[in-house]
Amino acid sequence: MSELPESAADLPGVPDGFQRLWVPHRMAYLEANPSRGGEPAGCPFCDNPRRSDADGLIVARGEHCFVAMNLFPYNPGHLLVCPYEHVPEYLDLAGDALAEFTALTRQALRTVRAVSGCHGFNLGMNQGAIAGAGVAEHLHQHVVPRWAGDANFFPIVARTKAVPQLLEDTRAALAEAWGDHAEEPAP
């Protein structure tokens, strides 16, 4: 029987320093996502509003847009603002849909801040697959709450993100508080 190598450096290949967290349930998403080369199985942002709020992780619904939890959040309270219309870019929104997209983003900021006590936000849209959009064919804006000290070495060292609250618990808290944080009309 041969001896085991003394270190990973003695193994074939080039060690990269990453631990592997196996998440085979993500493969269904990757294979079905046309922007990743898979066959279209339906757009998640078109399909989502057809579900109940709890099943779709929907926090709020407007006439032209809705707000939902991100299924793979960076932090607790990571929301997505999406138009119902299947458009790929921000420039494709106009009129009432654009106004509501902006209003829901602002309300998301106020509601998440009130519920979670976060200290700041990352807001962003990845326009196109080349820019990192996971679902490039349907516009969505990320609203990611941030706290002082929330960035630690766990994602860097362990390549793992810890999310301390269940999505449904976060969704329920935000949905309950949503109406309390609507923008007051200008005088």
Image: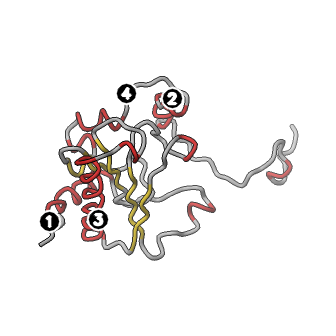
Within 10 angstroms of label 2, few (less than 14), some, or many (20 or more) residues?
some
Residue pictured at 37% horizontal, 37% vertical: 87
Question: Marks 1 and 2: which is nearer the front?
Answer: 1
Within 10 angstroms of label 4, few (less than 14), some, or many (20 or more) residues?
few
Which amino acid type corresponds to the residue marked 3 in the rendered image? Val
For mark 3, give the secondary structure.
helix
Within 10 angstroms of label 3, few (less than 14), some, or many (20 or more) residues?
many
Going by the picture, which residue comes out furthest to the top? 39
Tell me if residue 109 comes above or below residue 8 in the rendering: below
Q: Position of residue 112 (x, y in %)?
A: 29, 65
Q: Which residue is mark 4?
A: 42
Side of 52 where 147 appears, left or right:
right
Q: Which quarter of the rendering shows the C terminus?
A: bottom left
Which amino acid type corresponds to the residue marked 2 in the rendered image? Glu
Q: CA distance from mark 4 to mark 3?
A: 29 Å
Which amino acid type corresponds to the residue marked 4 in the rendered image? Gly
Side of 75 where 132 appears, left or right:
right
- Mark before the other along the chain sequence, 1 or 2: 2
Residue 31 marker: 2
Residue 112 marker: 3
- Mark before the other along the chain sequence, 4 or 3: 4
Q: Which quarter of the rendering shows the N terminus?
A: top right
Which amino acid type corresponds to the residue marked 1 in the rendered image? Asp
